[in-house]
Image (spheres, helix red, strand yellow):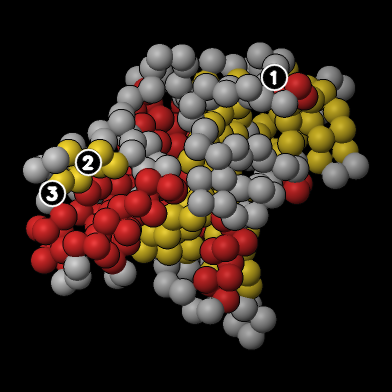
Amino acid sequence: MGLREKLLEKLENNRGEYFSGEELAQECGVSRGAVWKVVKGLRKEGFSIEAATNRGYALSPCSDLLTAGGIEKYLTFPCKIQVKKSVASTNDEVKDIASKGGAEWNVVVAEEQTAGRGRYNRPFVSAAGNGVYFSVLLRPKFSASETLFITTCAAVAVCEAVESVTGHKADIKWVNDVYMKGKKVCGILTEASFDVESGGLSYAVVGIGVNVLPQKFPSELEKTAASVFGQGEYPQEGRAKILSAILNRFRFYYEHIPERTFFREYKRRSIAIGRRVKVVSGSFECEGTVLDLDENCFLKIRFDDGTEKLLSSGEISIKL
């Protein structure tokens, strides 16, 4: 761990508490000048570090830039977190880690994505400082068929996490979009790599993007997208708390995929059951009513011609 990381961890874990330059220098085995140089650099990065004569330095409780330490202090399990200012895609960053043999629960977090994407390669707006954008490396040991539930259990984890921090109810639009008050606040993209020799899964990468702070969305998204917090609702360290809560809950559901522990909550939060929907699956396009959701998270739909079908993949649109 370099001097920057050591100082940031110390200040992050003791927000609002002052430490003298001499104390920090002795603890890190460097000069006071080196400490000041790092503090100056952190301020340029956007960290709100206060300085007071005869008191030293303190990270303001109101500072909202994400740090590994700021996330880890709310986690209930160890994982390797990297926080980056800007990347094209956190999924691509984690796939690179996976290709080099990285271990499960490597997590890349970005303040901004310049080429964030969702299902069907659609762009995902990832404005700097407005949300949490991160990807997780997994190396599943269960059967290939059960890896299909990684995305669905991640959706439940996001719902429970945002509810625990915001106090507002979250729902799921099949398969993996999280909605609040009728608008989308989160997208999830799972990508996998298969081992040619074994035929099994080499790794999976789960990318999660949550709109956290109130923001102005592009005109084409204004009617469908929203943020989990409204004006004046955002708490201190809100993004770090949501991100860590997602990881904590996702870890639990992921490890219990064979028992389908997530399913009850997934079905309870479905906004599709009982509603009329438009279904698009490949070249197939039709309208009908969703009757139920089975234990494999397949939608049971009765189409307007009276036929019924279990839908395992595809996309639905709902008039909310």
Q: Which residue is mark 2?
A: 51
Q: Which residue is mark 3?
A: 19
| Front: mark 2 or 3 | 2
In the rendered image, the residue lying farthest to the right is 283
Amino acid at the residue labelled 2: Ala
Crowdedness near tag 2: few (<14), some (14–19) or many (≥20) residues, C-alpha within 10 Å: some
Query: How far, Cα to Cα, is label 2 from label 1?
Result: 41 Å
Of the numbered discs 2 and 3, the one sitting upstream in the chain is 3
Q: Which residue is mark 1?
A: 222
Amino acid at the residue labelled 3: Phe
Amino acid at the residue labelled 1: Glu
Residue 59 or residue 247, whichever sits in front: 59
In the rendered image, the residue lying farthest to the bottom is 197
Of the numbered discs 1 and 3, the one sitting upstream in the chain is 3
Q: Which residue corresponds to the image point at 33% horizontal and 39% vertical from the top-left? A: 48
Of the numbered discs 2 and 1, the one sitting upstream in the chain is 2
